Amino acid sequence: MNEQELLTNELLQFVGLAQMEVIPGQPVQNLQTALALVAKARDAGVQLLALPELCLSGYMIGDLWEEQSFVNDCVQAGHDLVQASQDMVLVFGNVALEPGAVGEDGRPRRYNAAWLAQNRTLVRNPWTGFDFIPKTLLPNYREFEESRHFYDLRRLALERGVNLYDLCGEHSVSIAGHAVKLGVILCEDGWGEDYGVHLVKHMASRNADLVLNLSASPYTRGKDDKRNRVFSKLASDYRTPIGYVNCIGSQNNGKTFFGFDGCSTLYNARGEIAAGAKPWCEQILTTSTTLKPSANQAAERVDTISPWASAKTELVPADVHTLVEVITRYLARARISRVVIGVSGGVDSAVSAALFTHICGPQNVLLASMPSAFNSATTKNLAHDLAQNLGCFFVEVPIGESMDLTKRQIDGLEAQSFAGNASITLSLSAFHLENVQARDRSSRILSALASAFGGVFTCNANKAEATVGYSTLYGDHGGFLAPLADLWKNEVYALGSYLNRDVFKREVIPVGIFSIKPSAELSTAQNPEQGGGDPILYAYHDRLFHAWQQAWRRSGPEEILTWYSQGILEAKLDLPRPISDWFPTAHEFIADLERWWNLFKGMGVVKRVQAPPIVALSRRAFGYDYRESIMAPYFSRNYFRIKAELLSR
């Protein structure tokens, strides 16, 4: 066997991918984790070990990048890690500084970079002259904003007046006594088609024997399956093995929590998966690993059993796993062990209760029923049955007396102006009293119960409610976390049935909770026993709001009204039945459309910027994954033209 055949057929057996948990903002702790993995890899005979992108600093750390002492510590931790590369090749992601240079913000120039070391010495980058390999493509969409903090290879090429490809290529190292040409890229660099930058192709053209992709890639439903397709094709097209190494853990940008699921993978030169790491597990992945990632994970849908939800659901088992892992890490990092949940007898609070019971144990969960005169016997009984099934602590705290006190104190109260002799008389309408109920439950009772129980309380809002602000500020809008706020109502139902069937393996969420009509029960008109319920028609509005907020090519009122006028709205939104079942006339349809759009772009934004953080599962979660500003709603000119035509028929 000649040397080239050895590299083609046997190189991967010497490669290890260190899938490690990265704690954001803790370079010393992450260094200790990395050193332990290096020692483990050496004992296993690994001669080339790759660790994830920014594995010492963490990926989502905000403007901590502007604190030079922190950056200096990360750089020093990198040099400490280099010293562990005796008798092996070590590649890892870390921040790097270009001495004497400043970035576009006027601060010392930082790079998101790969460090390559062998025998305790950094391998000099022959293409840039640096001791590191800069990242080329800095994503600036969804939650990503790397160009805010880092310089990149494209800007460096422009600055030097050279072609981008003149600054990147293979790096020569020695593995098992053989010279190896190693290509190293970072995360987004492997997805360059949309940028018109083809780094894997470039490195393959220079006869790279292996390309390593160091990543910090947050979980998004379906992303792992797509990455397998993309990277398998790259490896196959260019006959070059690819190693993808990702971190695990939870990181956040202040408003949105993201899970990093790992799923590190080795692809051989035929594009086949040679080895795949188990999600959410810290491990050294080598070709001896037997586990192979599922190529059909995105198709493994979780069924829903509610008549109030759309037949279409996007929830997959990996979503549930991510949700549990992220919440578990958040609680541990914040040193929270006990949780209080207000339970109404509805599905959102029931799913939250089952989820936190699974994570924390029933001894650390307190469920609180807070009925008023408007709560039905059915929902009160369902809340009780839920707590009994889960084995949690349970209290019932009626709010009628406190509501009456508030009404007596405020209704009819005269307020005198100090600017003159004017006065006004304050009054609380029936609508105002609905908000009083919600605020009394959360701001008063749940917060007090959380203090007494030694824990925190949750916000149980789903994504449809978050979209249009169907919640009360300082009431049910409050909480330490909104775990369901990236799940549409139909997905909440699916999660509930999954928890019963696959997690608890028994009916902990009573079947009546799935069948009762969703209702806030804040007035007699909302009594579910008498056909009352929420104004959101979830089977329709889930899909409408999805088109506005989550679809990659988002639609607004103009597109929705165009599809309606053309008779194709049902197909475009994948509705379970004709739109006329909900809105018999164009007038009713347009009134509903404008009502919710005005809330989505109006008061809904005001509420979202004050909302608790959420856990991201989709590819467009609220928070910093969906940037928005407090502005007036906008309708296009063409919208008004189509509207006039429809109403004139």
Image: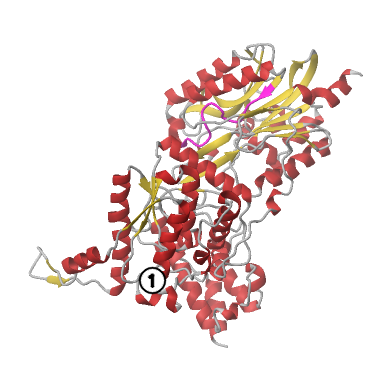
Q: Quadrant of the N terminus?
A: top right
- The spot of residue 389 in percent (x, y) is 47, 55
In front of the other: 294 or 28: 294
Q: Which quadrant holds residue 17? A: top right
Above or below residue 632? Residue 51 is: above
Magenta range is 49-62
Q: Is residue 501 left or right of residue 8?
A: left
Looking at the image, which residue sits at the far right? 1
Q: Residue at x 51, y 28 (%)?
A: 57
Q: Which residue is mark 1?
A: 376
Q: Is residue 509 left or right of residue 186?
A: left
Q: Quadrant of the C terminus?
A: bottom right
In front of the other: 401 or 91: 401
Q: Main secondary structure of the magenta part?
A: loop
Q: How many tags in the picture?
A: 1
Above or below residue 43? Residue 470 is: below
Q: Residue at x 35, y 43 (%)?
A: 455
- The spot of residue 102 in percent (x, y) is 50, 27
Residue 315 included in the magenta stretch of the image: no
